[in-house]
Amino acid sequence: MQNRITSNIVLATLIARRFRASIGGSDDFCTALEAMLPKDRHFGINNKHSLGRKSDVYVNFINVPKEENPKGAQGENNRMSFWIEGFPEGNEPPPSGKVKIEMSVSALDRKYKLRAKTGTPDQIAKYLSDFLKKVTEEVPPKLDRR
């Protein structure tokens, strides 16, 4: 039994070294992702919440230019949200070296659905930022100008 536990610890350490990335824990991930996201749109990134998901990162994106103030239905009609899971408590890197992203909500066309993916925090930050850049380039905001 002891040999099995030791071999599992060694294997986990080797995996963590293999996937070691420049982004460490959830705080580092939030900072890196914020720098990558389109600067001309509304978004929020949060890893401090009380939903029982203490170490996960929540991203709320509203495809409306910063000049506009999305209120009520206008914001909801242009909204996408995502969960990034796999960070441990505190600002430690994921034990396995990987995190998983899933789209939670999208009011946009089904053509713009982010597929769930697992990868290093670096890979997931780039994956999400590339996806949201594509959305901002291709999807015009639904604005009600009455």
Image: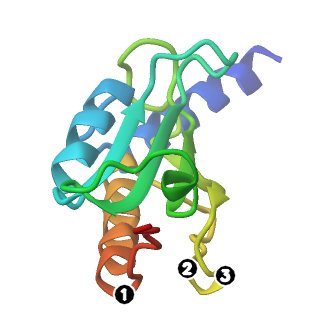
Please indicate whether residue 50 sits to the left or right of residue 52 in the image. left
Q: Is residue 26 visible?
A: yes
Q: Answer yes or no: do the residues labelled 3 and 2 have beta carbons within 8 Å?
A: yes
Is 125 in front, or is 1? 125
Residue found at x 60% / y 87%: 111
Question: Could you say whether the residue bearing mark 2 is in a helix, strand or loop?
Answer: helix
Residue found at x 58% / y 73%: 108
Residue at the farthest right position: 1
Q: Which residue is mark 3?
A: 110
How far, Cα to Cα, is label 3 from label 2? 5 Å
Badge 3 density bin: few <14, some 14–19, many ≥20, Cα 10 Å: few
Q: Answer yes or no: do the residues labelled 1 and 2 have beta carbons within 8 Å?
A: yes
Q: Hey, what amino acid is under mark 1?
A: Glu
Q: Which residue is mark 2?
A: 112
Is 90 in front, or is 3? 90
Q: Is residue 35 above or below residue 137?
A: above
Residue at the farthest front position: 146
Q: Which residue is mark 1?
A: 138
Tell me where residue 65 appears, x and y as whole percent.
25, 62
Please indicate whether residue 86 sits to the left or right of residue 146 in the image. right
Badge 1 density bin: few <14, some 14–19, many ≥20, Cα 10 Å: few
Tell me where residue 129 appears, x and y as whole percent.
32, 63
Quadrant where the N terminus sits is top right
Tell me where residue 81 appears, x and y as whole percent.
55, 50
Residue found at x 31% / y 50%: 42
Tell me where residue 132 appears, x and y as whole percent.
37, 68
Q: Hey, what amino acid is under mark 2?
A: Tyr
